[in-house]
Amino acid sequence: MYELGKLVLQKHYIPIVGQGKARWNNVHIEDLTKVYCALVDKAVAGDTNPELFGAKGYMFTENGEHVWSDLAAKIATEAYQSGYIGEPKNYQLGKDEALKVAGFEAVSWGLNSRGKAERARKFLDWQPTNVSIEEEVRNILKQEKALLEVK
């Protein structure tokens, strides 16, 4: 997300990798931390529940999913509305060009990664409570713009 914001600010376009249909889950880092803390608490307490530890001890976390091209468009629209860039246009990137302009993170903008946090919700009584990825766009752009101005 941060690299995507940085690329939009630097190149002034909406990067679309591949067909622009790739979907990913997202979760706020503070919500992810709650899952780790719950697992550590259970381990410290001596809980050996096989649903949490061992062969089945695999958890996904998510608070929804996004389509990378939609998220890129949202970031570019926010950057435009904030006066950071001119009106952005879509720009199609192949895998090699994405890698060249934004590193290995950009390649993921053309790949799918989907899961559900069913086990975390069921066995840890976990619920995400922080803001969505869309609600973080403005803050991330401000941070990336400040970093670019320092360089």
Image (cartoon, helix red, strand yellow):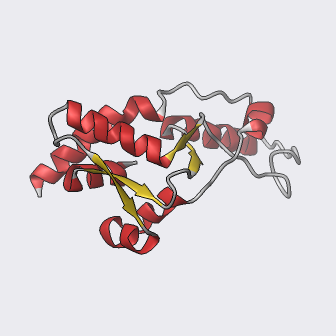
x then y, percent, for residue 91: 33, 56
Q: Which quadrant of the figure has residue 119? A: top right
The quarter of the image holding the C terminus is bottom left
x then y, percent, for residue 143: 24, 42
**Vertical order, 105 against 96 (above or below):** above
Please give left or right for residue 89 compared with residue 129 in the image. Answer: left
Q: Which quadrant of the figure has residue 17? A: bottom left
Front-most of residues 125 and 73: 73
**Vertical order, 19 against 75 (above or below):** below
x then y, percent, for residue 74: 37, 37
Toward the top, the furthest residue is 129
Badge count: 0
x then y, percent, for residue 2: 35, 49
Q: Which quadrant of the figure has residue 38? A: top right
Toward the left, the furthest residue is 150
Please give left or right for residue 100 compared with residue 60 in the image. Answer: left
Residue occupying image coordinates x 57% and y 59%: 111
Residue occupying image coordinates x 74% and y 32%: 121
Residue occupying image coordinates x 43% and y 68%: 94
**Vertical order, 61 against 8 (above or below):** above
Front-most of residues 117 and 106: 106
Residue occupying image coordinates x 30% and y 36%: 77
